[in-house]
Structures are given as C-alpha cells and as structure tokens.
Image (cartoon, rainbow, N blue to C red):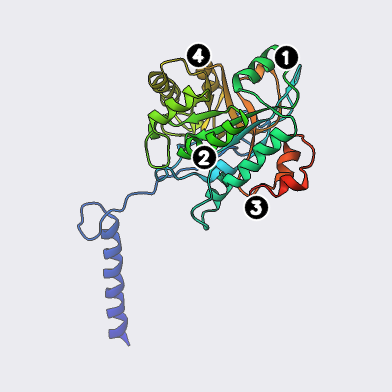
Amino acid sequence: MGRWTSGATRGGVLVLLFLIAAVLPGTGIARQAPLAAMSIVGRAAADDSDDPDGFIVEHSARPTPTPTGAPLLGELVVRKAPIPAGPVTYVPILYYHYIRINPNLRDRVGFGLSTPPAAFRAQMQYLADHGFHVISLHQAVMGIQNHSGLPSRSVVLTFDDGYADFFSTAIPILQSHGFTATSFVITGRMGWGGYMTPSQIVAADSMGFTIGAHTVDHVALAAQTPARATWEIKQSKLTLESVLGHPVRDFAYPYGSFNRYDMAQAKSLGFETAVSTLSGTWHSAGQLFELSRLRIGGGLPLAYFAHLIGGPPPTAAELTIGL
C-alpha cells in the first residue's frame, strides 16, 4: 500500500510539473495558443445603457470581420426612432437590401434581407395603383429642411450595399413605373461577386438613379477610431465622385452604427444628409444626419407593406400579382 502511495505521489508530482511546463513559454512541450480577441457584432441598435433614447448608436469594440459579402445579424436589428420635436415632415423612407430569392434556405439573415422580385414588383405596383409619389431622397430632404409641402403620399426608395441585383432586377421594375431610388454603395466592394461594377454604377447614375456612399469597408463606424471613421466616410465619397464625375451628397451608416462625431464628419465632408436604420416616418430639419427609415425585408406581406406606408389595404387583384 505504501509502495503504491509513493508511486502515485511521484506520478502526481510529474503531472504537476508537466502542467507547469506546458503554460510556460519557451519550454517546447506545448505551443502557446493565441488568446481569442474579444469582439462584438456591429448592430443597428446598441444596449439600452449605451443609448437610452435611441438616437445615437454606440459600440465599445471593433466588430469581427465577416466573410466577403456576408450580411451580419445586425442588419436585421431594428430600433424605433422617437418622433422628433418641433416642426416635422411626414415621409416614409424605405430601405431594401437584396432584390432576389434567397439562395440558401438555412440563411435566415439572408432571407430577412432578401425581397423576392415578385414581391418587389407587387409593392411597386401597389404604389403606382394608389397614387403614391416616389420622390428622390434629395427632394425629401429639401421638404424636411424647409418644412414645405411634399406631394401627397410621398415615399422614398433606398437600397443599401450596392448589390448587383439593384441594377439587374430592381431598376427595370422601377423604370416600368417611372420611379427613382437611391443606392448606397460600399465602394471597397465594387465589382466583387454579387455587387455592382463601376460601369453599372455609372449606368444607374446616368438613368437618373442616385448613388450614395456607404463607407469603403462596411464597418460599424461607432466602433472605429475617429481617424478610421473619417477615412471610411471621406474615401467612399471621393471614390464615387471619381467614378461618377460629380458630387455625391447622400450617405448611409452601415448597420445604423454612428455617433455624434460621425454625424459631424459626414456634414463637414459635404454630404447633404445621412440615413440611419432607426425606424420612423417623421423627420425634422435638425435630424438630416440621422434620418430614420423603414426596412423592407423578406416575407413581408403586401397588406403589411401597405399598412407600413400608410396606404389603403391592397385589392384582391393586387394580392395575386407575382403569384
């Protein structure tokens, strides 16, 4: 029994020495594993403690990089914007991402960001049938800034990220109704798989569609250093202006992530407005650099779309479009 105890003790000591050696650098017994970096995912809304009023989205760390073209869950997080004080103007500003049938049935994020072409066609037909006036973002900004009357049932259409299906699928449907729209382009992804090429961006611009900036790398701006945030905003504007040959006046915050510094930079760099992902339809002149919008995503019934923009219920015939 004593012999067994003595052997067990020696074995325990050897194990202990091995474990100590394993965690010491330079022993050669075990490789030193890198520490996992703490990160957050860029979101359209921060915790309540970050921003109890919902106006400014703050983040405390840089978001984890994502695979090329892969949307983050943050694209789906929606936070309601409070009704602004003072003189206000009502105009729904809608925003889309993909106009496609989601290619991966297991990709719930992709599904939420993908409006099927048939559904998009039905939505545009609904706007045409019920006397909605699709106006440009610039026209809406002028109306908000001057608190002047806009056409009845005005609505603005915007598309985030600069996906290729905006050019191939959305534009033909929009043109069939004489509608306009703004596409916010991630300049660092122009020409990548699934994104518009520079020539397509120029063509869309020449057709009368507005091209806006959406940073170079689609980063959550409030998670960046001031220098990086400024570069992302400024360089995306300069790149698009070089491609288009004229000023770019509209900006969109990726993931709806921004702070007061980012707002001030967007204004000082010459943008006319910057749109967020805060959900709302009432706007004031003091909030042109945090304009709220309404997200239109996959699986949205036409009846709910109509309710969202303040229109009448769709007719039975409208409900069958695209079926």
Lateral position of residue 85 relative to residue 322, left or right: right
Circle 3 packing at 10 Å, graded few (<14), some (14-19), many (20+), is few
Sequence-first disc among 1 and 4: 1
Cα distance in 3D space between marks 1 and 4:
22 Å
Give me the residue at 56% from left, 16% from top. 272
Q: Secondary structure at mark 4?
A: loop
Q: Nearer the viewer, mark 4 or mark 3?
A: 3
Does residue 185 sit above or below 5 in this rendering? above
Q: In front: 32, or 19?
A: 32
For label 4, the residue is 270
Sequence-first disc among 2 and 4: 2
Sequence-first disc among 2 and 1: 1
Q: Nearer the viewer, mark 2 or mark 1?
A: 2
Residue type, mark 2 in image: Thr
Q: In front: 266, or 176?
A: 176
Does residue 156 sit above or below 248 in this rendering? below
Q: Quadrant of the N terminus?
A: bottom left
For label 3, the residue is 323
For label 1, the residue is 147
Q: Are marks 1 and 4 in contact (CB under 8 Å)?
A: no
Q: Secondary structure at mark 2?
A: helix
What numbered label is drawn on residue 189? Answer: none
Q: Nearer the viewer, mark 1 or mark 4?
A: 1
Residue located farthest toward the top when viewing the structure as drawn? 146
Q: Secondary structure at mark 1?
A: loop
- Across and down, in percent, residue 252 comes to 53, 28
Give me the residue at 42% from left, 38% from top. 195
Residue type, mark 3 in image: Leu
What numbered label is drawn on residue 169? Answer: 2
Does residue 28 sit above or below 134 in this rendering? below
